[in-house]
């Protein structure tokens, strides 16, 4: 019986893949592990590297996608192959801290919870490390709202019981969104019943020029992604696993994001059209979004004055100043890019 399956979606990750694989297979652990790597139609030497690595490591299994299906589908196809008790995810350009697998395995035996959450750090482009959750103490709970803040991002910071991943909505089809992690984590949160939060950093993420977050950070793309995210979230919440408090917390967070991205778009020196009708329709799918909230979003998307007003009224001066700072730096970078391409 396999104790832990480690799922790795791989797409053009040749620069980081060896570090990722070594960080897993060179660990000493009493757990019976397997690694399922899904090459998502890479155009570099990632698949060749995986096949070469498999020659010396029998615990590595490889799935080959003939066309790119994105991370959510890749992870799902990997999880379908797993028969382990627990599943964890590692991105191909990231790596595990030495000893992480054994520590998580021991915690799984000690607490026998549905999900173990652990901390992480990010290596930024400037070489500095950014703290992840900043978990201060360990605790066990069945209160979903108490742990929800750890489920807004990063599927790779959770050890999850395999049964929770069966017949999920997320990953059944390709989703054109940068919020695949949020959707996966949300569905797991809604399905799970018990949690253990571990304060130790066990995972390291690398932010680089080819990272998805680096490529998809324009406010126009982020606003369009919110519409896709909301539709999938609606499917999840009406799949027999309703939790109104958890869903409303996410809607509040998304509402704040939409107001923020609208501000960045409206005050940008280069503006691209956004299908706000689809975004508004997606919010209307949820009964928690009353007419007042919907109207506030509509006005903020289309009006500089209302965008300024609602961002400061709802979220304060500090939030608005941060948006102004981001807008200034973004406009400077856009101006430089436009000048360099003249």
Image (cartoon, rainbow, N blue to C red):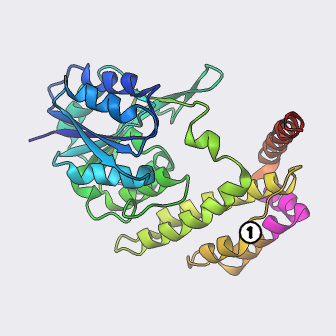
Q: Which residue is drawn at 49% across and 61% down?
A: 175
Task: Look at the image and say whether residue 250 sits in the magenta stretch.
Answer: no
Which residue is at a point 65% across and 62% down the rendered structure image? Answer: 224
The residue that mark 1 highlights is 297
The answer to whether 115 is drawn above or below residue 176 in the figure is above
Residue 161, x across and y down, in percent = 24, 49
**Considering depth in this image, is 185 or 317 the residue closer to the camera?**
185
Q: Position of residue 173 (x, y in %)?
A: 41, 64
Is residue 247 depicted above or below 260 in this figure?
A: below
From the viewer's perspective, is 181 left or right of 275? left
Name the residue nearer the viewer: 15 or 248: 15
In which quarter of the view is residue 57 placed?
top left
Q: In which quarter of the image is the C terminus?
A: top right
Task: Confirm whether the magenta stretch covers residue 311.
Answer: yes
Q: Which of 272 and 43 is in front in this view?
A: 43
Q: Residue at x 17, y 37 (%)?
A: 109
Picture coordinates of residue 200, whole percent (x, y): 39, 27
| Residue range of the region highlighted in magenta in the rendering | 299-314
């Amino acid at each position: 019986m396999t104790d832990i399956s480690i799922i790795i979606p791989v797409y053009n990750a040749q620069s980081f893949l060896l570090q990722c694989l070594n960080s897993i297979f060179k660990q000493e652990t009493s757990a019976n592990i397997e690694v399922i790597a899904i090459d998502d139609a890479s155009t570099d030497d990632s698949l060749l590297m995986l096949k070469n690595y498999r020659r010396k490591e029998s615990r590595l299994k490889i799935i080959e996608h003939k066309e790119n299906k994105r991370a959510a589908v890749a992870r799902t196809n990997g999880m379908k192959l797993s028969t382990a008790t627990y599943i964890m995810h590692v991105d191909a350009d990231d790596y595990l801290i030495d000893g992480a697998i054994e520590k998580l395995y021991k915690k799984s035996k000690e607490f026998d919870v549905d999900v173990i959450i652990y901390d992480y750090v990010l290596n930024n482009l400037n070489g500095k490390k950014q703290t992840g959750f900043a978990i201060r103490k360990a605790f066990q709970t069945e209160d979903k709202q108490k742990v929800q803040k750890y489920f807004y991002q990063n599927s790779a910071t959770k050890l999850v019981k395999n049964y929770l991943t069966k017949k999920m909505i997320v990953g059944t089809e390709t989703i054109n969104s940068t919020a695949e992690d949020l959707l996966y984590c949300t569905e797991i949160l809604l399905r799970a019943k018990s949690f253990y939060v571990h304060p130790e950093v066990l995972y390291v993420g690398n932010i680089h020029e080819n990272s998805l977050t680096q490529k998809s950070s324009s406010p126009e793309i982020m606003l369009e992604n919110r519409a896709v995210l909301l539709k999938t979230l609606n499917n999840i919440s009406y799949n027999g696993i309703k939790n109104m408090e958890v869903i409303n917390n996410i809607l509040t967070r998304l509402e704040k994001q939409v107001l923020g991205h609208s501000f960045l778009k409206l005050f940008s020196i280069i503006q691209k059209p956004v299908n706000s009708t689809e975004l508004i329709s997606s919010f209307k799918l949820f009964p928690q979004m009353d007419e007042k909230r919907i109207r506030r979003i509509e006005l903020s998307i289309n009006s500089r004055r209302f965008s300024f007003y609602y961002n400061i009224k709802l979220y304060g001066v500090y939030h608005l100043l941060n948006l102004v700072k981001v807008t200034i730096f973004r406009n400077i970078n856009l101006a430089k890019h436009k000048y360099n391409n003249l």
